[in-house]
Amino acid sequence: MKRFLVWICVATAFCAQVAAQLPTRPELGNARVVVLANNLENFYYNYAESSRPSYNTDAGREAKANKIVQMMIASGADIFAFCEVEAKPITLQYLVEKLNTAVGGDDYAAVEDGINVATDAYDNAIKSGFVYRKATVEPYGNDVATTNVAYYKNTMRIQAWTELTTGERFALSMNHFKAMSDDASKSKRVDNATWLMNGLSNSSKVKDPDILIMGDLNAQMDEDCMTVIQSNGYAEQLLRFDANAYSYVYYGEHELIDHAFANSTMAEQITGAAVWHTNTSTYYNNRYSDHDAVLVGLRLGTQGAAVEMIEIAEPARKEVRNGQIVIIRGGVVYTITGQRF
């Protein structure tokens, strides 16, 4: 907590605005790494190329970016996972430049993902992407899609991370499922969840067995797509810490449609999880999105030494021992806790 208080006041130009416009950030226990996920409601740099953004001027883009930066500073987070971001490199780069300017350093970077809707062979103008604090964590491996379904390659992404002080790792899956447009969309979200589970069974993508699933899944807990995720060994962490959690307000109804799921080994390393009402509890002029931010606090390594997953491409075989799937390579047995194949 001391690190958070000291660090946030370094950005003196933003402190007064943050205090005035944002609610108090929820407590997350004795976390060493804080992860924040948020739907940014169609945040575009090239706003003139799309009908999605709620702004149509440079000034509107800057105003929204400033609000996002204020939230990022106040969060004290080390990893930011965003969705509904323009699928071009320039947009997150622009946000990171404003963030670094605000804190007066070169503290943050965006993960390069190779996504550019201008050159992609498929048409999806938005993506999920990652920003991180360079002094705390670093990406391990690449930011890759968890599905081969073309339209969702941009929006269903996974990136593994290394905590610099400990060398511990975990995998963060950030997602944006099909919107709640009609009854037929429910089956499409089941497809999203099924593709995600299949993708998380591929160790060449996941890189570490401790898996955190976050994002705008556009579904409440009673939907079938949530059952798909839970039946594969993942538990909702927001409801673990607050049975009344919600992240979205629709015609007065409070809904939890932004989620944080963890498999068993990841859950043991979570010190707190909460929805931070950055948008549903503020006046419209202060909002930067229609979704609240979701926070997860991590104390990596508390469940014991992590077992790094092997590359599927390497010679190996699977067996079931004592009800658990293991991979055997070169006479060495690798466990894959919390996953289904």
Image: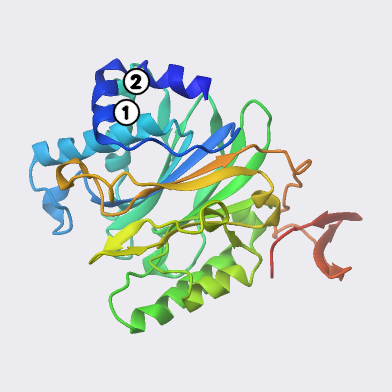
The answer to whether 163 is drawn above or below residue 275 in the figure is above
Numbered mark located on residue 151 in the image? none
Within the image, what quadrant is residue 175 found in? bottom left
Q: Nearest the camera: 194 or 73?
A: 73
Q: Is residue 97 above or below residue 147?
A: above
Indicate the amino acid at tag 2.
Val
Left or right relative to 13: residue 165: right
Instruction: Give me the residue at 66% from left, 44% from top.
Output: 269
Mark 1–mark 2 contact, CB under 8 Å? yes
Task: Determine whether the residue tagged by mark 2 lies in a helix, strand or loop.
Answer: helix
Q: Which residue is mark 2?
A: 103
Whether residue 128 is visible to the viewer of this picture, yes or no, is yes
When asked about the image quadrant of residue 97, the answer is top left
Tell me the element at label 1. helix
How much space separates mark 1 and mark 2, taking CA atoms? 6 Å
Is residue 112 rendered to the left or right of residue 209? left
Let me know if residue 208 appears in the view. Answer: no
Residue 227 percent coordinates (x, y): 55, 74
Residue farthest to the right, as pictured: 331
Q: Nearer the viewer, residue 3 or 170?
A: 3
Which residue carries the number 1 mark? 99
Residue 47 location, x and y as percent? 15, 49
Q: Residues within 10 Å of mark 2 (few under 14, many from 20)?
A: many
> How dense is the environment of label 1, judged by Cα within 10 Å: few (below 14), some, or many (20 and up)?
many
State the image coordinates of residue 154 (x, y, percent, origin top left). 39, 58
Q: How far across and how far down the image is residue 114, in percent? A: 40, 48
